[in-house]
Amino acid sequence: MIPINGFEVCNLKVRLGGRMVLRDISFSAQRGALVALVGPSGAGKTTLLRAMAGLIPSEGGIVADGEDVRGLSIAQRAQRFAYVPQDDSVHWPLPVHDVVALGRYPHGASRPGRLSPRDVEAVARALDAVDLGGMAGRAVTELSGGERRRVAVARALATEAPILFADEPTASVDPHYQLSIMTLLRRQARQGALVFVVTHDLGAAARFADRVLMLRAGRLEEAGAPRDVLAPAQLAEIFSIEAFRCDHASEQVIVPWAAR
Ligand SMILES: Nc1ncnc2c1ncn2[C@@H]1O[C@H](COP(=O)(O)OP(=O)(O)OP(=O)(O)O)[C@@H](O)[C@H]1O
């Protein structure tokens, strides 16, 4: 893994289709952290993730270890950033193994059938991490939505990139794998990665994130520890909900309870 220590976003603005979709976004994050991006639909979470990964044009600073990510070559970006897109549809009946092996292309792999021993190990580790070893030969087009989500996570893990952007990685995933994917992403962070996760699961954000960025209508409204950002006043103001909150096993539990 290429070490990256810090990531900084400064006065970020993004315009899409003639509309200002993100404005004045500034924050910094350090390796070792899992950062959750939350906010109502249309708040700009996916746009922020895509801008941070250098996938769409933006104004303002996006800096990884002192280097503007937009100045990096595509190959450099591909080695530094892994991306789990919100939409993981694959239209060709490729085997799960080959889709996950795409994560090795930034490291020089050119064909799933001709991987280096290091690539083979990385793909096997990624498949095992999401419990897909037994499905490696199945066509992705024949998997359930939740299984395809795990393939997308495995493909990102196979890149062994130091910064991981995951857009709703647990959407349509069953509770067992929701917990196991969030635990896995937190472990990636603890092992030195910087992980950004877009999620609508406020309970998962409260429990697994080290920091929460809360967006609304293209602006960063709150940034800080989950306990502070996901507090009753903010949940009421930003999400128009009341939530049940308690502590369990030294961790915060949040269950959205009533729409206001
Ligand atoms: N290509 C585009 N052209 C114009 N507007 C866009 C485009 N893509 C997204 N938008 C708008 O930008 C805003 C932010 O969209 P974005 O997908 O980032 O929101 P989000 O917070 O990820 O939402 P969700 O939780 O529903 O996935 C929305 O109002 C959306 O309609």
Image: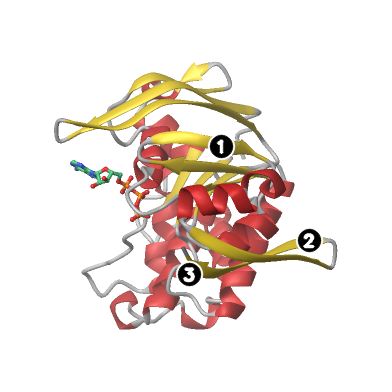
Instruction: Identify the mark nearer the N-term, 2 or 3.
Output: 3
Residue at coordinates 61% horizontally, 56% vertically from top-left? 205
Q: Residue at x 66, y 28 (%)?
A: 5
Q: Residue at x 57, y 66 (%)?
A: 124
- What label sits on residue 222 in the rendered view? 1
Residue denoted by label 3: 150
**Mark 3 Cα within 10 Å, few/some/many (few <14, many 20+)?**
many
Please tell me whether residue 15 is drawn above or below residue 44 in the rendered image: above
Q: Which amino acid does label 3 sit on?
A: Arg
Query: Residue 219: horizontal and vertical position, in percent?
Result: 41, 33
Q: Residue furthest front?
A: 260
Question: Callout 2: 10 Å neighbours few (<14), some, many (20+)?
Answer: few
Residue tagged 2: 251
Q: Which amino acid does label 1 sit on?
A: Glu
Q: Earlier in the sequence, mark 1 or mark 3?
A: 3
Q: Residue 149 vs residue 211: left or right? A: left
**Are discs 2 and 1 less than 8 Å apart at CB?**
no
Q: Which of marks 2 and 1 is in front?
A: 1
Quick one: 13 or 3, which is closer to the camera?
Answer: 13
Task: Tell me: 108 left or right of 5.
Answer: left
Q: Of label 2 and label 1, which has the lower sequence position?
A: 1
Question: Under tag 1, what secondary structure?
Answer: strand
